[in-house]
Image (cartoon, rainbow, N blue to C red):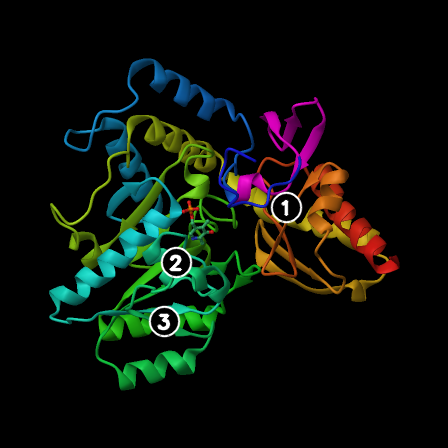
């Protein structure tokens, strides 16, 4: 019996070290990493400036408390605000917690307006995390069923359903926010329609709702901008992120601007570890490395190379039903069953993932070179070809 709760379906490999887009297992075998620890190591493994920042910080101070000033936290907040146009940030330790913060902000916004039972609009196919609030906002019956009762206060509509949004304006007076991933990740990589997001922004302005983006997965350079909203040109009031922010150190952030930035006040929210010196030092190094030469511009270059590799190897174009995503959130939906695909890729020393049941999910790091990116696409094609023949 394992000493660890069996909450994960783990692959039979254990890594000992990593550099750039490569991981090395305990037996010294190298693997090409096209998953980045699920959108975390966007700068690759063992990025020198992150390693240096963590090492230097570890030598002077790991933790104090949010009872005191934390210089590293203030510096990181100033850097993020400067790069995003956001105005105030709450730091936490994960994506779920960043979303919990956004949910509490939305409810606080409602109570400030005298709405006793504030409702947040969320989408089908959404994934916001595993804590009870974030799980309730998530749109997956499979991961919710065993943990009912869920938190009330969420109204779910189909993704891109502008009409449903308009109908809510007419029929309800208790909505306070729309919370969504501009590019849905876990449900199979679905970028939302631009027109839907534009309308969501307009309705939020008109109705005094908060537009709240979950960029836990899409953010931190992954989709061809520091945050996707900057590429889309649709500015949210609240921006939740985590994953790539620490490149492996656990840190999340809930950023806010305008009227959203004054919502949470002393006593409303807190965390022991959130914004601690070492995670903030790591995140500052990440943000500076990403923005120094706009590393996110590599996202589309790597994406193109992956599809070149895929197209050059695929036996028949009809084997690929759909390809979706933005930058380095890539969804490839084949017509063959995807059940064994991750394991077959592992056997070929390539790390990939399947999301939404039938979609190959690729989340490579921004530092992958184009030869390796072509190899990722070609290997995926090769596996799909072999499943067709099987
Ligand atoms: C991974 C993810 C989360 C949850 O993040 P954790 O750090 O695992 O709590 C929330 N939202 C989105 C969009 C994610 O991809």
The location of residue 62, given as percent across then percent down, is: 30, 22
Residue at mark 1: C-beta within 8 A of ligand 1 = no
Alpha carbon distance from label 1 to label 3: 30 Å
Residue at mark 2: C-beta within 8 A of ligand 1 = no
Please tell me whether residue 251 belongs to the stretch shown in magenta.
Answer: no
Mark 2 or 1: the one toward you: 2
The magenta segment is 13-38
- Residue with the mark numbered 3: 200
Against 255, residue 237 (above or below) is: below
Q: Which quadrant of the view contains residue 151?
A: bottom left
Q: Quadrant of the N terminus?
A: top right
Q: Secondary structure at mark 2?
A: helix
- Residue with the mark numbered 2: 135
Alpha carbon distance from label 3 to label 2: 22 Å
The location of residue 387, given as percent across then percent down, is: 82, 56
Q: Secondary structure at mark 1?
A: helix
The location of residue 179, given as percent across then percent down, is: 35, 63
- Residue with the mark numbered 1: 301
- Sequence-first tag of 1 and 3: 3
The location of residue 156, given as percent across then percent down, is: 39, 73
Alpha carbon distance from label 2 to label 1: 35 Å
Who's the residue at 58% across and 42% down the image?
A: 298
- Sequence-first tag of 2 and 1: 2
Q: Which quadrant of the view contains residue 237?
A: bottom left
Discs 2, 1 touching: Cβ within 8 Å: no
Against 162, residue 334 (above or below) is: above
């Amino acid at each position: 019996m394992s000493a660890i709760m069996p909450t994960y379906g783990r692959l039979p490999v254990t890594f000992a070290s990593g550099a750039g887009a490569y991981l090395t297992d305990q037996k010294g075998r190298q693997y090409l990493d096209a998953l980045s620890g699920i959108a975390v190591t966007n700068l690759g493994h063992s990025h020198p400036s992150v390693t240096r920042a963590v090492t230097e910080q570890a030598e002077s101070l790991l933790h104090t408390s949010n009872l005191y000033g934390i210089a590293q936290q203030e510096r990181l907040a100033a850097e993020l605000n400067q790069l995003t146009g956001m105005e105030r940030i709450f730091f936490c330790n994960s994506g779920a917690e960043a979303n919990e913060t956004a949910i509490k902000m939305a409810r606080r916004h409602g109570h400030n307006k005298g709405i006793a039972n504030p409702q947040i609009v969320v989408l089908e196919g959404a994934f916001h995390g595993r804590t009870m609030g974030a799980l309730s906002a998530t749109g997956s019956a499979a991961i919710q069923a065993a943990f009912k009762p869920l938190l009330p206060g969420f109204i779910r509509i189909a993704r891109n359903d502008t009409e449903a949004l308009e109908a809510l304006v007419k029929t309800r007076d208790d909505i306070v926010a729309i919370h969504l991933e501009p590019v849905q990740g876990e449900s199979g990589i679905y970028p939302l329609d631009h027109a839907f997001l534009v309308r969501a922004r307009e309705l939020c302005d008109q109705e005094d709702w908060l537009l709240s983006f979950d960029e836990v997965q899409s953010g931190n350079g992954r989709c061809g901008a520091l945050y996707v909203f900057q590429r889309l040109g649709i500015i949210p009031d609240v921006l939740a992120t985590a994953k790539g922010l620490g490149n492996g150190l656990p840190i999340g952030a809930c950023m806010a601007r305008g009227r959203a930035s004054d919502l949470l006040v002393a006593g409303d929210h807190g965390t022991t570890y959130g914004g601690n010196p070492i995670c903030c030092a790591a995140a500052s190094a990440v943000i500076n490395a990403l923005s120094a030469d706009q590393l996110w511009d590599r996202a589309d270059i790597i994406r193109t190379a992956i599809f070149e590799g895929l197209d050059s190897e695929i036996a028949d174009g009809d084997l690929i039903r759909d390809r979706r995503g933005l930058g380095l959130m890539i969804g490839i939906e084949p017509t063959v069953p995807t059940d064994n695909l991750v394991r077959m890729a592992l056997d070929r020393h390539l790390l990939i993932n399947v999301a939404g049941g039938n979609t190959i999910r690729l989340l490579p790091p921004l530092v992958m070179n184009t030869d390796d990116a072509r190899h990722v696409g070609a290997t995926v094609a090769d596996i799909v070809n072999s499943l067709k023949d099987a």
